[in-house]
Amino acid sequence: MPIPTHFTLNTGAQIPAVGFGTWQAKPGEVERAVETALKAGYRHIDCAAIYRNEAEVGDGIRRSGVPRSEIFLTGKLWNTKHAPEDVEAALDKSLQDLGVEYLDLFLMHWPVAFNGATGKWFPLRENGVFDLVDIDPATTYKAMEKLLDTGKVRAIGVSNFTVNRLNDLLSKTDVVPAVNQVEAHPYLQQPPLFDFCKSKGILIEAYSPLGNNQTGEPRTVDDELDQSNMQVKELPKDAFDELSGLERHKRFNVQSRWGFDIFEELGQEQVRKIAEECAEENKTKFTV
């Protein structure tokens, strides 16, 4: 099965299959990283207000020389800006920082609202828990729907939504989310969520596709799923015997774990040759 280069959103727009993430990229580093990524061929840049580096991302885009029209740019609405009157202003701030006139995709980062009156990104109450406010995600999403008429966003979607959250949202709003961006990899596959989104025309976009190495635990807002992720299961003896019999020198075949051919299984010599060819080609394009 050939590797797809793009996927089609329910808006008809094409989103590149591989995106360049900017989470935890420090100012001063992310600018050069984005510039290099775009020069190397990336055409999808994933941003968020909470990453606090959108100005540097914008600098990297401009330094790359790649036209804005060739780049798919994703932004996200942070939890402190869920009040309907704050949504467009939050988008405008991201557009200003990035130095662009529109986003290709604007996502609600999480289906929870923080108290934005504190002026803090992660407001806490005196007992140390997050200072949440009672704003229905559907109310926030309706404000995002209005942005489609402004030309400032080409598509809207959500992130970290479960099936129950999506069902509730769909029952109260008009525009089906183009994307649900969630953590997804071989250790967190969530088939029911994937099947549901597919049935509704919502594209699943994976973050941490090679696994989450920050806490060792997948992030979720679903208590039941959180509990299942923490369960420890004992492997049967035949499984241990099979693992013990593996040839340790061979590369792990990751294709079947993702369900389709994400990476070709290449030998060491082929990998070396491809790396040399890419390095030689890049010399003629730009200096890293």
Image: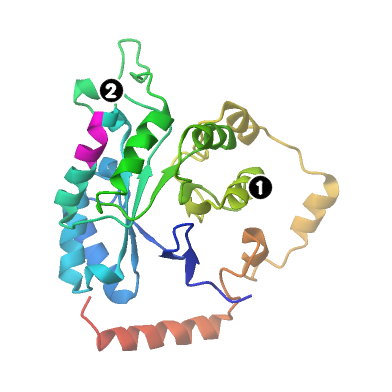
Does the rendering let one see residue 29? Answer: no
> Which dot marks residue 123?
2
Which quadrant of the figure contains the C terminus? bottom left
- On the image, the x and y values in percent for residue 66 come to 23, 73
56 and 103: which is toward the camera: 103
Q: Earlier in the sequence, mark 1 or mark 2?
A: 2
Q: Where, by quadrant of the figure, is residue 98 drawn?
A: bottom left
> Which dot marks residue 191?
1
160 and 32: which is toward the camera: 160
Which residue is at a point 41% across and 36% down the rendered structure image? 110
- On the image, the x and y values in percent for residue 161 come to 50, 38
- The relative height of residue 256 versus residue 238 in the rendered view (above or below) is below
Which region of the structure is painted magenta?
A: 85-90
- On the image, the x and y values in percent for residue 258 come to 62, 60
Q: Where, by quadrant of the figure, is residue 141 drawn?
A: top left
Does the rendering let one see residue 21? Answer: yes
Q: Could you tell me the amino acid type at mark 2?
A: Pro
Which residue is at a point 53% across and 33% down the rendered structure image? 171
* Secondary structure of the residue carrying numbered label 1: helix
**In the image: residue 119, left or right of residue 252:** left
- The relative height of residue 129 versus residue 146 in the rendered view (above or below) is above
